[in-house]
Image: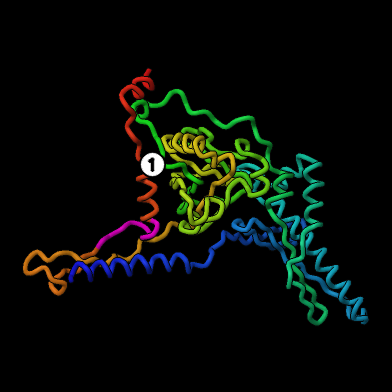
Amino acid sequence: MRNTTISTLFLLFFLFAAVHIAAQEPDPVIRPVVVVDAPTGVVAEGELDWTAGTVSVTGEGFVDDDVTHPVRRRLLGFRAAKIDAYRKLLEIVGGVQIDARTTVSMAMVASESIRAQVEGLVTGARVVPGSQIEEDGYFRLGLSLDLRGDLSAAVLPGSTAAGPAIPQDLPYADSVVVFVPPKPYTGLVIDARGTSLNPSLSPRIIDDSGRVIYTAGYVDRGYAVRTGVVAYERDLQQAVVSDRIGGQTARPFLVQAIDISGLYNSDAVVTRDMGTRILMAGMEADFLTECRVVFVVGPKPAPPPPIAVFSEATTGDSTLGDSMLGEAQPTGDFLDSILEARALADTLPAEAPEETAAEIVE
């Protein structure tokens, strides 16, 4: 009877956890942006949604009171608001980081072709449905521009012939150990929470020796332009089941970032050993060239309160009434811990057969 009761309690707990995940609202990576033009002091405000891959602004316009015809007032008012929105959008897009060292405005200065393409995309930005507001001579509308697609095609670097090779000079510890994933991974999730990583269009993954593991130059450019080099999420549970990784049937390779790098802090740093594991797993499943990579950013989740668990009493009969209420002290979010434990089990190295180990040593 007692075992049945405890089993029921644990079953209810895990059902609650599953419902909690399903009921979670998406928590996109949104960064408000304010750009101040130094000579004039004009301020451009906008919003970068790195999860949806969009940049949006709101333009404002006014019409003089001497314009009395209602149709003319409306046309002039929204025209003024759209011109204001174009100006703001160009300022905000110019500040978008392409990589850890370059912004879109830098690329526009360096290339007239890129400047012309970006300016053309800005003037072709779509009006956000329902954003047009008219009130007492005050007009407002919103514009939105996709960071992926044409903008990425204009500013992302071209792809190279091939990515980095597996290093020949493996350390001795790796010479007798071979990393073989139990099953091919469907994508890579980099947990960069707790760092000050800034999103960009073309971030890199590098290891602590400086070796580049993942960059826009190593991927299929078609995927990079269409879906972005990486996706950004705030919630780990949402990241591991995102459509980019494979949805509910995803099998993500979960890796912890140990640091960040680059002038604008947009590159994630992993250990050298983990960098090699990422390359080997990517060669088997091809998820790197198809940009099936997600960065999880934001603050590190605080440890949850202790979880109450039932433990056997040291004396007396083993009945539910005599059970003692113990405390488990998990580190980090409980659901995160489940994912991290699974990832740890997946990344444990398998010892190579003697003949294979001998070949590696040679």
Q: Judge from the rendering whether residue 240 lies leftward or rightward of residue 73; answer left or right.
A: left
> In the displayed structure, would residue 350 be above or below residue 344?
above
Q: Residue at x 29, y 65 (%)?
A: 306
As drawn, which residue projects farthest toward the top? 362
The answer to which quarter of the image holds residue 335 is: bottom left
Q: Position of residue 267 (x, y in %)?
A: 54, 43
Name the one closer to the observer, 59 or 52: 52
Q: Residue at x 43, y 42 (%)?
A: 183
Residue 189 shown in magenta: no
> In the displayed structure, would residue 111 be above or below residue 316?
above
Q: Judge from the rendering whether residue 74 lies leftward or rightward of residue 273; answer left or right.
A: right
The answer to which quarter of the image holds residue 42 is: bottom right
Q: Position of residue 19 (x, y in %)?
A: 43, 68
Residue 333 shown in magenta: yes
Q: Position of residue 125 (x, y in %)?
A: 77, 59
As drawn, which residue projects farthest toward the left? 316
Residue topped by disc 1: 347
Q: Judge from the rendering whether residue 94 lies leftward or rightward of residue 196; answer left or right.
A: right
Which quarter of the rendering shows the N terminus?
bottom left
Residue range (magenta): 328-336
Q: Residue at x 60, y 59 (%)?
A: 31
Q: Residue at x 53, y 42 (%)?
A: 261
